Amino acid sequence: MINGLFVQLMMFATAIGLAFFYVKPTLTSIGTIQDSILEYQTEKQKVTAVNDLLAGHVSTINEIPADSMRLLTTFIPDTVNDVAVVRDIYYIGEEAGVELGEIEFSGLDQQQASAAEGLLEKETGPYAYNFSVKAEGSYYDIKRLLSLFESNKYPLEVTELEFQNGEEGDLSANISLTTYAHTKPLTDLSANQF
């Protein structure tokens, strides 16, 4: 009987030892794994929601007609070639019948672009490229020049305009123009005079 009681106590102690040293750590490990699985499923649902939102945006962009995308790229190009803009200003002046003096690229101005639009982010653009033009001609020629700037294939915004009486009844105008691009140039542009 003592022998049987001893064996039973030993079996009971072994069972408690197994439960304490083997089963409990295994259950704790299983709980930790289940918590990780739950966290993974939650994060996977968040990623799926973001991917669905992104797919919706891509779908919206893909629905824009190709002609509209081409026109948008033309209207606000990725980059601005300052020499080409000066050339365009010169041709617009010729078409308007005004005599152009200096056409100067004044530089890149991110602050002015942000202030002009009010909602633009400083780091992502659009970036403003400033030009100054001196023009001389009749009132109607200057008016036509401003109209041609307005109807250009890319934006040439008149940001500043000063009139003075010129020679022989003509007007002299100092015009500040701004055009925009989506990206900042790779090189730092300094003021060039043409």
Image: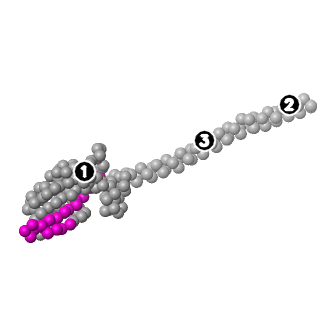
Residue at 18% from the left image edge and 49% from the top image edge: 83
| Residue at mark 3 | 33
Few, some or many C-alpha atoms within 10 Å of disc 3 (few <14, some 14-19, many ≥20)?
few
Residue at 69% from the left image edge and 38% from the top image edge: 25
**175 in the magenta segment:** yes
What's the residue type where badge 2 is placed?
A: Val
136 horizontally vs 29: left or right: left
Residues marked 1 and 3 touching at CB (< 8 Å): no
Q: Which picture quadrant has residue 69?
A: bottom left
Quadrant in which the N terminus is drawn: top right
In the rendered image, residue 115, in percent from the top left (x then y), is placed at: 33, 62
Residue at 9% from the left image edge and 66% from the top image edge: 167
What's the residue type where badge 1 is placed?
A: Ala
Residue at 75% from the left image edge and 37% from the top image edge: 20
Residues marked 2 and 1 touching at CB (< 8 Å): no
Q: Is residue 103 above or below residue 20?
A: below
Q: Which mark is residue 76?
A: none
| Residue at mark 2 | 7
The magenta-colored residue range is 162-182
Q: Which picture quadrant has residue 101?
A: bottom left
Mark 2 or mark 1: which is in front? 1
- The tag earlier along the polypeptide, 2 or 1, is 2
What's the residue type where badge 3 is placed?
A: Ile
| Residue at mark 1 | 191
Query: Magenta segment, principal secondary structure?
Result: strand
Q: How many marks can you see?
A: 3
Q: Is residue 187 above or below residue 166?
A: above
Mark 2 or mark 3: which is in front? 3
Q: Is residue 167 above or below residue 84?
A: below
